[in-house]
Image (spheres, rainbow, N blue to C red):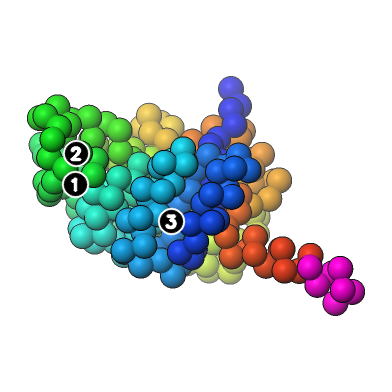
């Protein structure tokens, strides 16, 4: 059965106004893009808190695939992490372990915001493992080749399709949603669904959004703050005939 995914946007800059406007306009989710954006750790911690208070679901795409960024994002109170540049199933196993507390994974324990600064009881750790999402990205040939094994990991809650990098790395250039691109996407989706896991993707146009709906994506991104700013500036110039 087709269902509408949560509708989100990428935050590329340290703009609290973008988060406020997005929430007012009806966006449901924000992804702080620390891999390609210009968001510092100090600002990200505050943006996570603000976005949660605005009622947005918050994911962080990490600056790098490593233990510290994973744990920091979750300690800030993000609802989940998106881990870029996964090379294969063993790489995913090592990294996704950092997103879950023992005995499921190896996430370190600290007195942080989700645990109400150490005031919550021992039930917190199991709840955190259930409620916080770990989404490795499938954007490399190695990850695609071993996508079934990645999806099957107990520390993985879903897969995030990285269509542009995947197409580039497979020698097809920027993703054009050719038959080969669609086949790769459907392979990722099938692996997630057969493992009983979620999946998500960028869907910045009608065709991609409909594809995501047809395949029951958990969430999609349809915009980003930098492109939205460009659109607004372009519209202003058009008033002047420029």
Q: Are marks 2 and 1 in contact (CB under 8 Å)?
A: yes
The numbered disc on residue 32 is 3
In the rendered image, residue 144, in percent from the top left (x then y), is placed at: 41, 52
In the rendered image, residue 168, in percent from the top left (x then y), is placed at: 52, 67
User: Disc 2 designates what residue?
Assistant: 115
Image quadrant in which the N terminus is located: top right
Image quadrant in which the C terminus is located: bottom right
Q: Residue at x 48, y 57 (%)?
A: 16
Q: Is residue 216 left or right of residue 43?
A: right
On whether residue 113 falls in the magenta region, the answer is no
**Front residue (pair 75, 151):** 75
- The magenta-colored residue range is 236-242
Q: CA distance from mark 3 to mark 2?
A: 21 Å
Q: Is residue 233 left or right of residue 220?
A: right
Image position of 10 with respect to 35: above or below: above
User: Which quadrant of the figure has residue 159?
Assistant: top left
Secondary structure at badge 1 equals loop
């Amino acid at each position: 059965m087709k269902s509408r995914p949560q509708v989100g946007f990428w935050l590329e800059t340290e703009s609290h106004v973008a988060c406020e406007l997005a929430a007012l306009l009806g966006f449901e989710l924000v992804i702080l893009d620390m891999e390609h954006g210009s968001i510092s750790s100090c600002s990200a911690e505050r943006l996570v808190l603000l976005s949660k208070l605005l009622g947005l679901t918050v994911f962080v795409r990490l600056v790098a695939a490593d233990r510290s960024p994973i744990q920091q994002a979750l300690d800030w109170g993000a609802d989940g992490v998106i881990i870029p540049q996964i090379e294969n199933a063993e790489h995913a196993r090592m990294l996704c372990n950092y997103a879950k507390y023992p005995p499921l994974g190896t996430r370190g324990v600290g007195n942080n915001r989700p645990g109400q600064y150490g005031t919550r009881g021992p039930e917190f750790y199991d709840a955190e493992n259930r409620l916080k999402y770990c989404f490795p990205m499938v954007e490399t040939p190695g990850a695609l080749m071993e996508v079934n094994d990645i999806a099957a990991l107990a520390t993985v809650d879903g897969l995030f399709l990285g269509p542009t990098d995947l197409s580039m790395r497979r020698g097809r250039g920027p993703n054009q949603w050719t038959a080969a691109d669609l086949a790769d996407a459907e392979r990722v989706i099938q692996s997630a669904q057969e493992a009983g896991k979620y999946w998500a993707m960028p869907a910045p146009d009608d065709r991609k959004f409909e594809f995501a709906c047809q395949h029951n994506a958990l969430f999609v991104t349809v915009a980003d703050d930098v492109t939205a700013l460009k659109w607004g500036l372009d519209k202003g110039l058009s008033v002047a005939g420029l």
